[in-house]
Each structure stands twice: as structure tokens, then as C-alpha cells.
């Protein structure tokens, strides 16, 4: 009888150890608590920006305005890596005078937000932030290509 009790006790202790070990292996840092209302609003802005980014629309100013709004209000958005990529490339394309929305040289607000130097600086900053902050993102490789395009463009204009 004592032998059975010892076996059950040993089995219980092993089970307890495995349970403790398994729970210790879980992520000790809690996941970011996301506000469902802010997530929904940010997701809407991303969806609108993705539509504006398409080759058909090429509305890069609209992308940047949506990004600015979202980044200022909710920088912890779950899909910020994608938004950084779209915003970075939109900044670069606008700096190259691409897209269907043109910068009005008579509009002071346009010149402040969409001036060439600021667009290039923002493009590099957004793409670099994506690479640095989200190294596992599926957009990292494209962001690195974008950074190389920007470097090549800057080298070409400095000659």
C-alpha cells in the first residue's frame, strides 16, 4: 500500500513540475493591450491608405495624411509595420514627383508637409523605423529595397 502511495505522489510531483515548467516557458511579457476602438479606427485608415497607394490611384498625399493621423493617435497599431512601409514609399514617390496628387507650390501647408527635403527625410525615417522596430515583418525586405532606391536617387541628384 505504501508503494502505491509513493508512486502516486511521485507521479503528482512530476505532473506538477511539468505544469510549472510549461507555464514558465510562456511569454513572460504580456502582449500589448490594444484598444479595440483605436484598432478599428487605425485599420480603417490603413485600408483607405492602401487603396490610395494602389497603382491605379497613386494618391500619395492622402496616404501620408492618413498615416500622420494614425501614427499621432495610435503608434502601437498592430499593423504599423505595413503602414510605415506604405507611408515611406509614398513619401519617396512624392519626392520624385510621382503620383496623381501634385504639390501646390503656392500652398504654404503643402510646401511644409510635402516639401522635397521633408519627404526624403520622412521616407528614410519611416522605412528605417520599419526595419529596426519590426525586424520580423514581411515588409522588411521591401523596405530595405526602398532605402536603397532612395540612396541611389540621392546619389544621382548630387552628381
Image (spheres, rainbow, N blue to C red):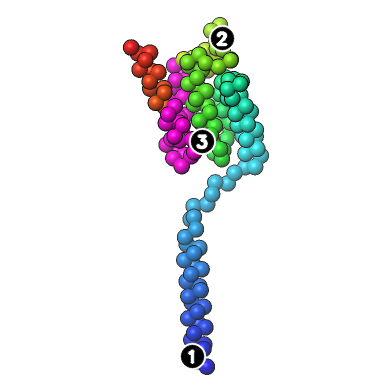
Q: Mark 2 points at which residue?
A: 104
| Residue indicated by mark 3 | 81
Question: Residue at coordinates 55% horizontally, 12% vertically from top-left?
Answer: 103
* Residue displayed at 56% across by 28% down: 67
- Tell me the quarter of the picture where residue 146 sits: top left
Residue with the mark numbered 1:
3
Q: Is mark 3 on a helix, strand or loop?
A: helix
**What residue span does the magenta drawing correspond to?**
117-146
Which residue occupies the foreground of this view, 148 or 63?
Answer: 148
Q: Is residue 100 left or right of residue 155?
A: right
Q: Can residue 112 be seen in this view?
A: no
Q: Nearer the viewer, residue 43 or 110?
A: 43
Vertical position of residue 120 compared to residue 8: above or below = above
Residue 136 visible somewhere in the drawing = yes
Check disc 2 and report its element: helix, strand or loop. Answer: loop
Q: How crowded is mark 3: few (under 14 residues within 10 Å), some or many (20 or more)?
A: many
Helix, strand, or loop for circle 1?
helix
Q: In this view, does 40 lie to the left or right of 86?
A: right
Check if mark 3's residue and mark 1's residue have beta carbons within 8 Å. no
Q: Residue furthest left?
A: 159
Query: What x and y, as percent, mark residue 133?
Result: 45, 38
Amino acid at each position: 500500500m505504501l508503494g502505491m502511495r509513493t508512486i502516486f505522489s511521485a507521479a503528482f510531483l512530476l505532473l506538477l513540475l511539468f505544469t510549472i515548467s510549461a507555464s514558465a516557458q510562456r511569454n513572460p511579457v504580456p502582449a500589448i493591450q490594444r484598444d479595440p476602438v483605436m484598432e478599428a479606427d487605425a485599420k480603417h485608415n490603413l485600408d483607405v491608405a492602401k487603396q490610395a497607394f494602389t497603382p491605379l490611384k497613386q494618391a500619395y498625399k492622402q496616404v501620408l495624411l492618413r498615416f500622420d493621423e494614425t501614427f499621432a493617435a495610435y503608434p502601437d497599431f498592430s499593423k504599423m509595420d505595413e503602414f510605415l512601409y506604405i507611408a515611406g514609399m509614398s513619401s519617396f514617390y512624392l519626392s520624385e514627383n510621382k503620383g496623381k496628387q501634385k504639390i501646390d507650390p503656392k500652398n504654404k501647408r503643402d510646401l511644409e508637409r510635402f516639401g522635397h527635403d521633408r519627404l526624403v527625410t520622412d521616407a528614410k525615417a519611416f522605412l528605417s523605423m520599419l526595419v529596426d522596430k519590426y525586424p520580423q515583418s514581411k515588409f522588411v525586405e521591401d523596405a530595405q529595397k526602398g532605402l536603397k532606391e532612395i540612396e541611389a536617387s540621392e546619389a544621382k541628384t548630387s552628381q
